[in-house]
Amino acid sequence: MTTRTAGAKQQAGESRELVEMSWDPITRIIGNLGIYTKIDFKNREVVECKSTSSLFRGYSVFMKGKDPRDAHFITSRICGICGDNHAVCSIYAQNMAYGVKPPPLAEWIINLGEAAEYMFDHTLFQDNLVFVDYCEQMVKETNPSLLRRAETAEAPNAGVHGFRTIADIMRAFNPFSGAVYKEALHVSRVTREMCCLMEGRHVHPSTLYPGGVGTVATPQVFTDYLVRLLRVLDFVKKAVPMNDDLFDFFYEALPGYEEVGRRRVMLGCWGAFQDPAVVDYDYRTMNAWGRNMFVTPGIVLDGELLTTNLVDINLGIRILLGSSYYDDWQSEETFVTHDPLGNPVDQRHPWNQTTLPKPQKRDLEHGNYSWVMSPRWYDQRTGDHLALDTGGGPLARLWSTALAGLVDTGTVRATGRSVEINLPKSGSLPEMRLEWKVPRWANTIERNRARAYFVAYAAAMAVHFLEQALGEVRAGRTQVFTDFDVPDDAIGCGFHEAVRGVLSHHMVIRDGKIANYHPYPPTPWNASPRDMYGTPGPYEDAVQGLPIFEENGPDEFKGIDIMRTVRSFDPCLPCGVHMYLGGGKELKQVHSPTFGASLSG
Amino acid sequence: MTTTQTPTGLDELHILWTSEGMSCDGDTVSVTAASLPSLEDVLLGLVPGLPKVHLHNKVLATEVGDAFMAAFHQAHHDELGPFILVVEGSIPNERINGDGYWTSMGNDPATGEPITVNEWIDRLAPKAWAVVAIGTCATYGGIHAMAGNPTGCMGLADYLGKDFRSAGGLPIVNVPGCPVQPDNFMETLTWLLYQAAGMAPTIPLDEMLRPTWLFGKTVHEGCDRGGYYEQGDFAHDYNSPKCLVRVGCWGPVVNCNVTKRGWMDGVGGCPNVGGICIACTMPGFPDKFMPFMDEPPGGSVSAALSGAYGSLIRRMRSITNNTANKEPKWRHNRRRLTSGYDARWGNG
């Protein structure tokens, strides 16, 4: 259904000469990831891709029987770059289970901490990890003729960012020596300090609790945040036009590059930034408070906004097996038969999952090959189990928010087809309005471009949240924590956006202890292997059928277009993929009918 | 060449850093936040006297796949030159899972099978000039070694043995913290680099192999809310800026300097900014401190006493501190899983 199979020739059953190539471990990401491919160099196309993760730690297993109030401290440790997103999501789930509503100031403090996290993490990932794939040093090795052209290509926004040619931008991203690379490291520190001001520490916060925060909410903490925010605004304002210039150059200089990493528009966003005026963490009103979040939850299918209702989103989640190292739980206990609104809950929903790890040999050809499971979203209208992706986070967030047209804070406005972002005056640049417009494709470049815009989105939101927080403080409403009791039996769910996309935590409490807990971060969605229906996960799908633009032949092949594609999803595999460069060795010839069948969904 | 008995006075050194243990990569990410000194200061040679350093770390590498793994294979075959091995993440027990594995890094070029992290440690630790465990997972087992875990996780010293010595004659150097406080790691690394250059004596470590100047004091001894404690004035919930011991803070018995150093360049921290100390630097973490949000046993007893009874309190605390400094007994590399693992609810 959703798979872009490997091209017309394969469909016709013509035999092709394929080279197996893999990259394992994939670097410049968080966690263990391997990418295994079969490439047709004659026709310059990747024909097959499998994504594997070789790490299992077992959070959902060892959390059983623990005190539910420990959940956010424990689950923060799932991820070493967005641990605070997990802590916050867990706290949302706990608030629901305990029936507690934090004071408004606590919500603004969490929103400010999370806005800083987006700014930090996207900056570090984009400029210090992703952009190495677009830097002068790399482009020289993979596409020397493109670099020659970049040397003479004027950068249209040079007046804002200061780099005259596209090649100058590429040079600025050379690792450890380029000007923007170094400045980005600095900005990633300042923004992390902002996160620490609100949440105590980065990456595993200390001051977040169910019921609120422990942050000392005097004016000082907000002043300290504000001045740091103002200090990085110049950087943020320059980053967006610089990204636009570079990515537009790729489209122009390499016709057809829009097909790199392109997949059907099938995006999920679970929403971010609660509005304390509306949120009460009651499941029964979740649709209303979900739609008031400052990033609108939604599922975007083929350019249409299918739903913004968190209840629909919740009930559609299915965790499938097919290529993962676990036993099935269909005959295990059903923890939640119906949700608090009386809707039936599927046995493959996270509330009812029992994780039964089964270590085994990796079998990439005919068996199981990953510790990652296959989350899918069940589309009731068609009966499809959709392999949604997150577009690396920002693409889905901006797309869903833009189409919903609900967000309007003054600093950010969703128009129905775009998102307007207004940033105040900063050190060297005046007020600036940026506009992210719904793109024509969900592909590698648009995932990366959206990331630069979302840093600006988060910065503009932070301006709004600061005003709201200071309003509370000035009005004397300085409570940041509401006490609560843990019920003997309860359920809860939290929905949030980790930096790289959808994040959910599902908890079941029995006898005052955690009876079941399943976090679903973005990467299982993006990095999932083939499911029981044979549908490939998004990385696999985006790389399969990818046209190759790299100028190197098999002997010197770096797989740069594949790397760019996988990294565009912002892989974070503690939450899974590995690539190995085969040095162009021709391992074997495969005739397409052998695997053609496994690709159709 | 071999690195055994490398004389000090090295002018060039590799850092082979694996975060493929049972980790979240949070210690690597944390180190990118350091500024005292920063990672790029060290790599660009801006700290006078340090040897030239080549870093091989997955998150920051330019190379991918086999090109990234090359240095690890060279070190295994004694072809790289002197190196420091940095281990991030807890060490799983790979003796309990049949044909499978819990975690791996790269593939064996001959067989195409994954190479486990444990195999890499076996290959590289004895050849390393120094071995550094970064973060509480690698040092003592940490979160992934919690009761009921399926992987039989442990700390590096549980795996290699307490008596392990590197090629440079050093025990494992432990820098705990979940994650590691950024500057604590960079400062430890800098000491080791000075030592490698022949400019510093052997790094001073305590019994749990931690640098003494970083972990010799407790959180409480450095906490600016200690004055409230002294006055018997305690927070009853998290709204209060006073001492947090009655709402879950373990600071009095935890070895850590976060209250002095803050989290980043003095900003943030734990009890000093409203976050209870959950003892994330300790060998007994997390099991001995859960549920985190309850008052530690004896917290209010010692809180009720003060002043004249100071020496008594110090003795009582040192008993609790001794317990906190011991790992639970299921962290080992024997052929049996003893963590109490049960995948199903309600069987216990």
Image: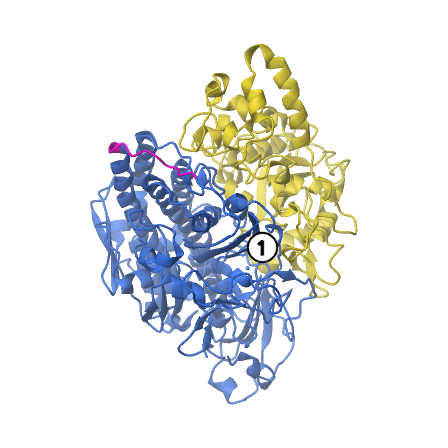
Rendered location of residue A556, percent (x, y): 55, 66
Q: Secondary structure at mark 1?
A: helix
Q: Is residue A481 magenta?
A: yes
The chief SS type of the magenta part is: loop
- The amino acid type, in three-letter code, at marker 1 is Ser
Where residue A574 appears, as percent x and y from the top left, is 55, 54
What is the residue that sits farthest to the right in this orientation? B335
Chain coloured yellow: which letter? B
Disc 1: which residue: A60
Question: In the image, which residues are magenta?
Answer: A474-483
Q: Residue at x 47, y 82 (%)?
A: A7
- In this view, B345 is above or below A317: above
Up the image or down, A55 lies above or below A232; here it is below
The answer to whether any part of residue A162 appears in the image is no
Image position of A514 (left or right of B140): left
Chain bearing mark 1: A
On the image, the x and y values in percent for residue A355 come to: 61, 60
Chain that is blue in the image: A
Q: Does A362 appear in magenta?
A: no
